[in-house]
Image (tube, helix red, strand yellow):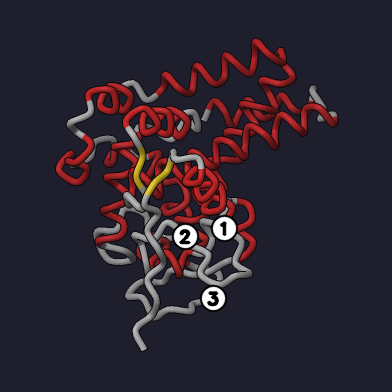
């Protein structure tokens, strides 16, 4: 909530071309951390990383201030098991838009998570440490922006950028189960939404994702832009990301 209040500072620090570059760059790199790190790697294991790259991806993801990677992945896996049913942690069809968008995060009911849901990562002490101290990457990122660009860059490249990250990420939980088209007859209300896909680097192809949750690629058709997948494809050419799992076609 403090970050939301901090956005008011933009009234006295209007954007310039350089500040908008700070905003766009810090938003894009951390959104990639959310989509490629929190979601497709720790949430679904849709590709493989070495141990050093795994830690770096977790660090980048947590710079977005969306808690620890194990917390994030455990709750996301629960969402997929119970999608739009009674025990879904953030279904707009069960508890309404506000709850799905941000209410469940503000609630203290979900501060903990079932470690059994992410058991494969518990063998990595550095990941457990990072998950417990989830604020460290956020502080490091914000401090680095402030040191490099001063107060204006901190405001636009950290405060405003982080708030935008929050709401664009949360829109997948809320809007992507209410607004869009359904190509696949999944047992939930997931939707494909091109607008959300653009602002979340491909996450808006949400019905595709619920049809094939283990796929590294969420844009099934050639015209469904999935920037996260394209970036991971480049990392695979560099030998960093490996074994990108393909999209599961519908049974005909």
Q: Which of marks 3 and 1 is in front?
A: 1
Query: Along the polypeptide, which appears first: circle 1 or circle 2?
Result: 2
Image spot of residue 228 (x, y percent): 54, 50
Q: Residue at x 68, y 13 (%)?
A: 148
Q: Callout 3: few (<14), some (14-19), or many (20+) C-alpha neighbours within 10 Å?
A: some
Q: Position of residue 16 (x, y in %)?
A: 84, 29
Location of residue 127 (image quadrant): top left
* 1 relative position to 95: left or right: right
Q: Name the residue under label 3.
A: 181
Labels in figure, total? 3
In the drawing, what numbered circle is on residue 217? Answer: 2
Q: Quadrant of residue 73?
A: top left
Residue at horizontal 23 percent and vertical 40 percent from the top? 113
Q: In this view, does 47 lie above or below 126?
A: below
Q: Residue 237 at what x, y percent from top left?
A: 51, 46
Q: Earlier in the sequence, mark 3 or mark 2?
A: 3
**Image quarter of residue 56:** top left
Q: Which type of secondary structure does the marked residue at label 1 adopt?
A: loop
Q: Disc 1 to disc 2, how far (Cα)?
A: 7 Å
Q: Would residue 154 be found to the left or right of residue 51 on screen?
A: right
Residue 226, numbered circle? 1
Quadrant containing the C terminus in the rendered view: bottom left
Height in image: 71 above or below 76?
A: above
Disc with the residue nearer the chain's start (3 vs 1): 3
Q: Measuring 49% from the left and 56% from the top, which residue is drawn there?
A: 172
Contact flag, marks 1 and 2 (Cβ < 8 Å)? yes
Residue 204, percent from left and from top: 54, 60
Dot 3: what SS? loop
């Amino acid at each position: 909530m403090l970050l939301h209040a901090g956005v008011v500072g933009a009234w006295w620090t209007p954007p310039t071309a350089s500040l908008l570059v700070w905003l766009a760059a810090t938003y894009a790199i951390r959104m990639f951390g959310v989509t490629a790190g929190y979601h497709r790697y720790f949430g679904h294991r849709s590709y493989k990383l070495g141990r050093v790259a795994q830690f770096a991806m977790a660090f980048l993801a947590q710079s977005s201030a969306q808690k620890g990677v194990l917390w994030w992945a455990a709750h996301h896996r629960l969402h997929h098991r119970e999608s739009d049913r009674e025990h879904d942690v953030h279904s707009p069809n069960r508890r309404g838009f506000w709850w799905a968008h941000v209410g469940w995060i503000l609630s203290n009911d979900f501060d903990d998570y079932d470690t059994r849901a992410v058991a494969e990562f518990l063998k990595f002490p550095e990941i457990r440490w990072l998950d417990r101290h989830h604020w460290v990457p956020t502080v490091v990122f914000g401090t680095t922006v402030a040191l490099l660009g001063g107060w204006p860059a901190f405001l636009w490249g950290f405060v405003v950028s982080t708030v935008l990250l929050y709401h664009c990420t949360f829109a997948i939980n809320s809007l992507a189960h209410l607004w869009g088209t359904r190509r696949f007859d999944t047992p939930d209300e997931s939707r494909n939404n091109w607008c959300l896909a653009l602002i979340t680097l491909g996450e808006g192809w949400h019905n595709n994702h619920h049809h094939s949750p283990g796929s590294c690629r969420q844009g099934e058709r050639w015209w469904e832009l999935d920037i996260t997948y394209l970036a991971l494809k480049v990392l695979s050419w560099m030998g960093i990301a490996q074994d990108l799992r393909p999209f599961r076609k519908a049974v005909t």
